[in-house]
Image (cartoon, rainbow, N blue to C red):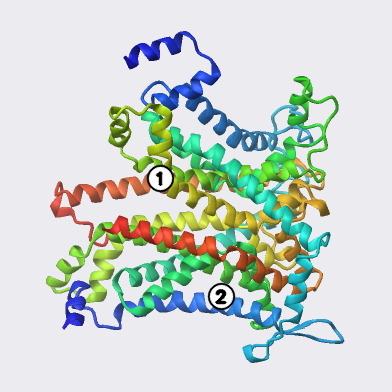
Amino acid sequence: MSSSHARTETLHPSPARRLGSWLRNPWGRPRFLWAVAIAYMAWSLLPVAIAVLFSFNSTRSLTSWQGFSTQWYVGNVSSVWDDPVLLDALTQSLKLAALTVLIAVPLGVTFALALDRWRGRGSGTANFVMLFSFITPEIAIGVALFLFFVQVAEGIGPGFTAQLMGLSMFMMAYPVIVVRARLLSIGKEYEEAAMDLGASPLESLRRVLLPLLAPAIFASAVIVFAASIDNFVISQQLSVGADTQTVPILIYSSARRGPLPSLNALASLTLFASTLLIAIAALAYRRRTRAQRAVEHGVRPLQVPLGS
Amino acid sequence: MTERAEAGATGAWFPRWFWPSFAAPASLWLLLLFLIPFYVILAIAFGDIDPIFLTPTPVYSPLRWDVTAFRDLVSSIFTSGSIYQNAFTHTLLFVSVASLLCLVIGYPVAYFLARHAGRWKTLFLVLFLAPFWISYMMRMLAWINLLQPSGYVNRILESLGVIEAPVAWLNGKPLTVILGLTYGYVPYMILPLFATLDRIPSSMLEASRDLGAGGVPTFRRVTLPMSRQGILAGLVIVALPMFGDYFTTTLLAGTRNTAMIGNLIQTSIQSSLVQTGASLVLILLALLIVPMLYYLRATERAEELFAA
């Protein structure tokens, strides 16, 4: 009965019918939904693709395509490579993101371990504060940090150190969430086995648990790096002058002032950097967890990844 | 007795202080860079102002807090026609329309992803997730390029005969701001919706159809109620950061009559009306505390379900 129904519909397709047909028959060919999904994807990605394309424009126009050139990356006096303002913003962004990873990831990983294993009264509070910091609108955090560094921590003051401290606090939630999820799926058996075999708590942590957590730690490091390199609000609230200007701050301040394609080139470079990192991380994560799943299912019981 | 049993469950070999000590560095970081800065905001909002230099003097003892300035600010928000009230009504309008648009766009896309993407699911997921690691500023820059008077949007609309002359999209148009916010935050809506829709077992839908419900009643009485959690979570996730947004409207409209609460905070802090800025942050948080707590409760419950 339903098949004859579907047939009459394909014979007389009308937009209203199609909208109705995916509601009536969720197992039929959902042309309407495919159209929506593809339209959404075009809307979401085409503007960015066009912006990347125009970073390769051969003239200074951002609205009409004149041919391919890499002069806005290197060569032209106002290219990313040759304009010190752009190059400084890029190095500043990379520096801030890398150092944020170095602080936020260890803090987050130890915090995740503590939350997973320590069931005291304080752990709930600490977790709540951490999650609360993560969903507070960034402008509130940015202003609070700015006033803190102006009024209380005057010795440090707004600037690169303040940016680094603020961002590493805000980004800590990523490793906590990713590592906790992984800890839940690992369980405690490996550590207990290690300690049955005579390992001390610290040894079992270092030689058993950390290697098992490595993919999750690596993945969260990449997420923190990508999120920090794109961070705008906190970095802007704590920035003073050109020395602490990151790529998003520079885009924000010059996007409406008749920018050159070199601004697109700068934005594209950070996009390439995060895409490359995410791709590497995804591949590495899949390989590591696949190998571990094989171990967990007893395929290669002798190769438990100890300190690899 | 029970304490010892608990200790056994969490690994009896660890000394009692072992895991809590892991939480110490991150907790210290949260205390120093989240809790204390927010206390500074309170101390400034309810503090004194130097009568000569008009600089704020934080008052750290709650017993000596003075709420007059705060009360004046609140009453000026309720004064019709004040810049404060304008910003609040704009923010409410922009955020509610943009959040609903996010839902209207995000729901079919998430539904498609969960039910119909089939073997393309991974590819689609990667593409739908792409906006997460493309910098927000770059996505806005892309639209600034497209919405220039000579940009592609005007050229396409003109060639289709929709408009006669180029439209100045970037000069104080609320529509541009709303669409910009929607574009910026819709990926955050799709993710929780996808997670909920993906979890609805198709046997539920089959059962509903076996019991004689057609497609539309099945959607209305099974799919929609079962995805209510995801809808609410999605709305909260997109609305929270939108309420604190000040950069989207600055970049896409840049006029006084499209200013949002975030712009008020930003300009107050910059023009040394620091006390007003701090008070506005408190008012913003007071507005958002209910959805924030709701969201934390919801994720906590989801975590419990996941752990069970």
Residue picked out by circle 1: B195
Disc 1 residue type (three-letter): Ala
Q: How many residues crowd mark 1 within 10 Å: few (<14), some (14–19), many (20+)?
A: some
Work out which quarter of the rendered image holds the C terminus of chain A and state it: bottom left
Please state which of the two labelled residues, at mark 1 or mark 2, is closer to the viewer: 1
Q: Chain of mark 2?
A: B
Residue lying furthest top: A11
Is residue A73 at all visible to an observer of this figure? no
Q: Could you say which quadrant of the image residue A139 lies in?
A: bottom right
Tell whether A92 sits left or right of A302: right
Q: For the residue labelled by badge 1, is the local secondary structure a helix, a strand or a loop?
A: helix
Q: Earlier in the sequence, mark 1 or mark 2?
A: 2
Q: Residue at x 40, y 41 (%)?
A: B197
Tell whether B251 sits left or right of B294: right
Q: How many residues crowd mark 2 within 10 Å: few (<14), some (14–19), many (20+)?
A: many
Q: Residue at x 48, y 61 (%)?
A: B294
Picture coordinates of residue A220 (x, y %)?
43, 57
Picture coordinates of residue B212 (x, y %)?
32, 27
Q: CA distance from mark 1 to mark 2?
A: 32 Å
Work out which quarter of the rendered image holds the N terminus of chain A and state it: top left
Disc 2 residue type (three-letter): Leu
Residue picked out by circle 2: B33
- Residue situated in front as seen by the camera: A246 or A23: A23
- The correct choice, above or below, for B10 with respect to B187 in the image is below
- Residue situated in front as seen by the camera: A256 or B285: B285
Tell whether A92 sits left or right of B10: right
